[in-house]
Image (cartoon, helix red, strand yellow):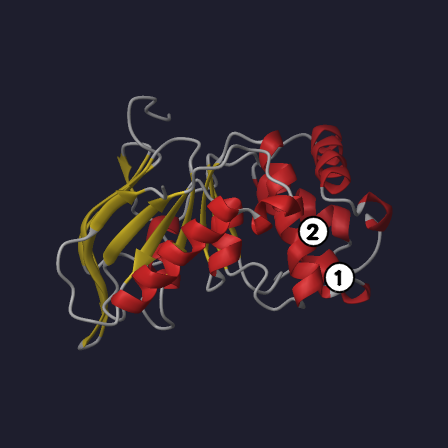
Amino acid sequence: MTNAAAPAVALSAVAHRFGALDVLGPLDLTVADGEFVALVGPSGCGKSTLLRLIAGLVPASTGRVFAAGTAVDGPDPRRGMVFQQPALFPWLDIAANVRFGLDERQVPRAEGDRRARDWLEAVGIVDFARALPATLSGGMAQRAALARALAPEPDLLLMDEPFGALDSLTRRDMQALLESVRQRTSATVILVTHDVEEALFLADRVVVLSPRPGRVVAEIVAPFAHPRDEKLRLSAEFLEARGMIERALAASRHPITEPESALQPG
């Protein structure tokens, strides 16, 4: 059962290493229930590793990871994940792929079909419900992967560079789609991305990590209301906030001092 008084995610002195290589932390991070947080940082700083620790796919080397007040000790259906590649089952049609998590949870078939169709409508590919994944474009396949992650109604949605393999125009479309879909779910979202503009357009808060081993060096609160549209990207407020993130990334390449907490433009 979810502890309503606890944050959606809390990391305490978390660090991770592969063999003798320190890749992450130690770091502390708290994500509020319903918050959308984006993680940005240099390649190899441990962003994806951090997401996998929260998902319970790998255990932290040191420190503790909590989700809704409970220690994470393995995968949980309340935590959905979307990867850079859609990872759809090639032998299942799109509707069956989206329904897969519901079938695993033994949701009645009629209810599973209804929820799968609702989410396929939400992501704009309901007409392809009976198509096989190989017939879909990259953007359409990622829409299906997003619908599959959301159909079980997870408390927490973890997204690891979900649009990184897409061309720039399709990526913009997917960002707009995610912003729209977000209005349909109360899930907390943590997004890993290398795209500063994407992070700022989508997130409530952008967390900047240092080079390996990744540590929190800045947190920039996005001062924009939802829903957001394309005009926001051209606003002076958006450009100022983007500059703050880019400066924090540049500064992170120098020795770490104290993190800047909850910076706000203006």
Q: Residue at x 43, y 37 (%)?
A: 223
User: Does the residue at mark 1 contact the one at mark 2 (Cβ under 8 Å)?
Assistant: yes
Mark 2, other Cα within 10 Å: few <14 / some 14–19 / many ≥20: many
Q: CA distance from mark 1 to mark 2?
A: 9 Å
Q: Which amino acid lies under the numbered mark 1 shown in the image of this protein? A: Pro
Dot 2: element:
helix
Percent across and percent down for residue 44 are 34, 73
**What residue is shown with label 2?**
144
User: Can you see residue 166?
Assistant: yes
Residue closer to the observer: 156 or 213? 213
Pointer 1 or 2: first along the chain:
1
Q: Is residue 147 left or right of residue 65?
A: right
The residue lying at 63 percent from left, 38 percent from top is: 181
The amino acid type of the residue labelled 2 equals Ala
Q: Could you say which quadrant of the image residue 205 lies in?
A: top left
Q: Quadrant of the N terminus?
A: top left
Relative to the observer, which residue lies in front, 140 or 196? 196
Q: Which residue is situated farthest in the left direction here?
A: 257
